[in-house]
Image (spheres, rainbow, N blue to C red):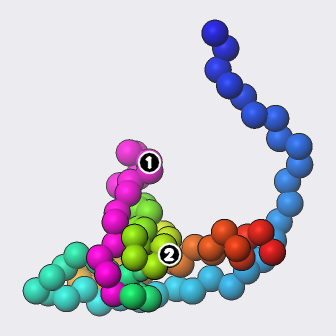
Amino acid sequence: MSPFREKVLGSTTFSFEMLIHRVVLDSDNPLPSCPTCHDLLDLHQPDEGRPARLLAVCLSCSKWYLWLDEDATADRMTLFELPCPETIRE
Ligand SMILES: [Zn+2]
């Protein structure tokens, strides 16, 4: 059985504004929360070889963030807010 391989029909580029959130973690509760609604973020590590690159998802407001922990200090982090599907489709 051969593995499924998609066929790339073309590629294109688009530009968008990306919000970058610089966050100071609360020392009493160091779990990261959503900069938009302040609910706790659900963290995912898509690449086992790169533990400092996390996908952070807010299950309350459905925003997604890329968390690059490579240059973070113990109490600070940077979250890059990913565009929503509606923005990508426009
Ligand atoms: Zn949220």
Q: Quadrant of the N terminus?
A: top right
Q: Is residue 28 visible?
A: yes
> N-terminal of the two: label 1 or label 2?
1
Q: Is residue 80 left or right of residue 30?
A: right
Few, some or many residues within 10 Å of mark 1 (<14, 14–19, 20+)? few
Picture layout, residue 68 above or below residue 50: below
Toward the left, the furthest residue is 28
Report the residue at 44% width, 48% height from top.
47
Query: What residue did someone put label 1 on?
Result: 47
Report the residue at 34% width, 72% height from top.
41
Q: Is residue 44 magenta?
A: yes
Image coordinates of residue 25 in percent, x first then y, are 25, 86
Image coordinates of residue 65 in percent, x first then y, are 48, 72
Q: Quadrant of the C terminus?
A: bottom right
Query: Which residue is nearer to you in this view: 90 or 56?
Result: 90
Few, some or many residues within 10 Å of mark 2 (<14, 14–19, 20+)? some
Compute the Cα span from label 1 to label 2: 20 Å
Q: Is residue 7 magenta?
A: no
| Quadrant position of residue 27 | bottom left
Q: Which residues are magenta?
A: 38-51
What amino acid is found at the position of numbered circle 1 in the picture?
Asp
